[in-house]
Image (cartoon, rainbow, N blue to C red):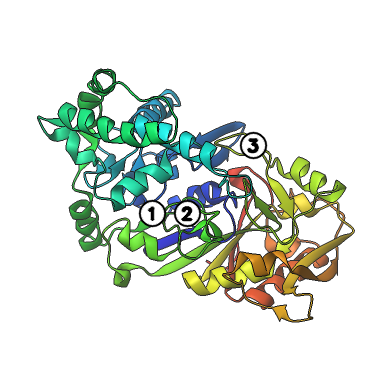
Amino acid sequence: MNTVLVGAQWGDEGKGKVIDFLTEEADVVVRFQGGSNAGHTVVVGDKKYVLHLVPSGVLHDGKHCVIGNGVVMDPFDLMKELEQVESWGFDLRGRFHISERAQMVMQWHRALDRAEEAARPAGRKIGTTGRGIGPAYAAKVGRCGMRVGDILKPNFLDLVRDCVEEANLKLRALGAQPIDPGEMAKLYAPMVPALMPYVTDTIQFLHQNLEAKKSILFEGAQATMLDIDFGTYPFVTSSNPTAGGACTGSGISPRAIDRVIGVLKLYTTRVGEGPFPTELTGPEGEVLRRRGGEFGATTGRPRRCGWFDAVIARYAQRVNGVDFWAMTKLDVLDEFPVVRICTGYRRADGFVYTTFPADLDALAACEPVYEDLPGWQCSTSSVTDYSELPENAKAYVNRILELIGGKLGVLSVGPARETTLRVGI
């Protein structure tokens, strides 16, 4: 069974936890896009693990983990994370692989990221993490990026110097401090022997596993509403975290995919700039943030919080072809007397959008249409079987499924690994 797992909102849905849960049945876990701007959190017992580049499957001994060609990888971030994983007691020898076709995020990409964001006028800032992701993808599309396989070339450090000179033209134009090419060459020289053992033809590796009937799990970072094509453009990431990206980001045919699982938080959050129709700016939003621990795993920034938005979830179902939903953080809603679901966006003239509009100006002129359901006002965090949930909690989940389509596969009622309930998969 080959599975693609994607976020169905604006990220932070709990993908790391669900990937960790599904990895028990997988042989290989593949990260297919994004970079170290992602943050996947897994809680096992009293230990909390946060991963940014390394697939979450690394926390399971014996599972192979792959960074696919669709990822933009910062070598320094990766080496730091690999050291951390090994300090946790997980052995990576022979089971961690980096695509030779993956792009690298270099220090000048970070400098460009900061300079470009600073130059954007108010109201047009993206809310980037400043980790160089956008400029690295821009270099890839502009055919002037650096791939992991470049470290195998004898002239790698010459390539570094040439790329720095090119980046300096842009940095000077933005009024930013240029970078010394020689210093960059010295900085990256130690990366060559450190990374070489992991560089692999991952396309061949994955197809060998397919031929051997191994189970592959494809792990997406970010989420549908941050997709460069389908998200709230321009307030998006620079890659395709939707299901189609699993194929282009790994070299696997769509015919090899057996199912798509979408991850949904049972309320909605967003980090950074951009539209958020159901955002709560008063006490209810603070309760969601406090109870849900809504602070970025990568940046530490407080997340914007709001009610569940069925419009974007239904949109994500269509774009990704979601077969099963993994729903998370039901327990965060335990104390609310009323829980709300957004079913549409109403314009001033009375027209109601029931699908997500591409025009963000049109969206900004709308207000959410809500359906109210009674809350359950009791703890769900100790529930170990779906049938034990309060009736109002089940009614809330079922109503969401009626509105968005797809089947329930997994339900999470807490952060720990053991609070994940298997329902329909």
Cβ–Cβ under 8 Å for marks 2 and 1: yes
Residue 336 x %, y %: 86, 55
Residue 212 x %, y %: 22, 60
Q: Residue at x 47, y 50 (%)?
A: 221
- Counting residues from the start of the chain, the first of labels 1 and 3 encountered is 1
Q: Amino acid at mark 2?
A: Leu
Compared across the picture, whether 85 is left or right of 351 comes to: left
Cβ–Cβ under 8 Å for marks 3 and 2: no
Residue identifier under label 2: 22
State whether residue 65 is above or below residue 187. below
- In terms of image quadrants, where is residue 45? top right
Q: Secondary structure at mark 1?
A: loop
Q: Which class describes the residues within 10 Å of circle 2: few (<14), some (14-19), or many (20+)?
A: some
Residue identifier under label 3: 301
Q: Amino acid at mark 1?
A: Ala
Q: CA distance from mark 3 to mark 2?
A: 28 Å
Q: Secondary structure at mark 2?
A: helix
Residue 205 or residue 125, whichever sits in front:
125
Q: Secondary structure at mark 3?
A: loop
Which label lies toward us, 3 or 2?
3
Q: Residue at x 79, y 75 (%)?
A: 348
Q: Residue at x 75, y 44 (%)?
A: 289
Q: Residue furthest right?
A: 337
Residue 4 visible? The answer is yes
Residue identifier under label 1: 26
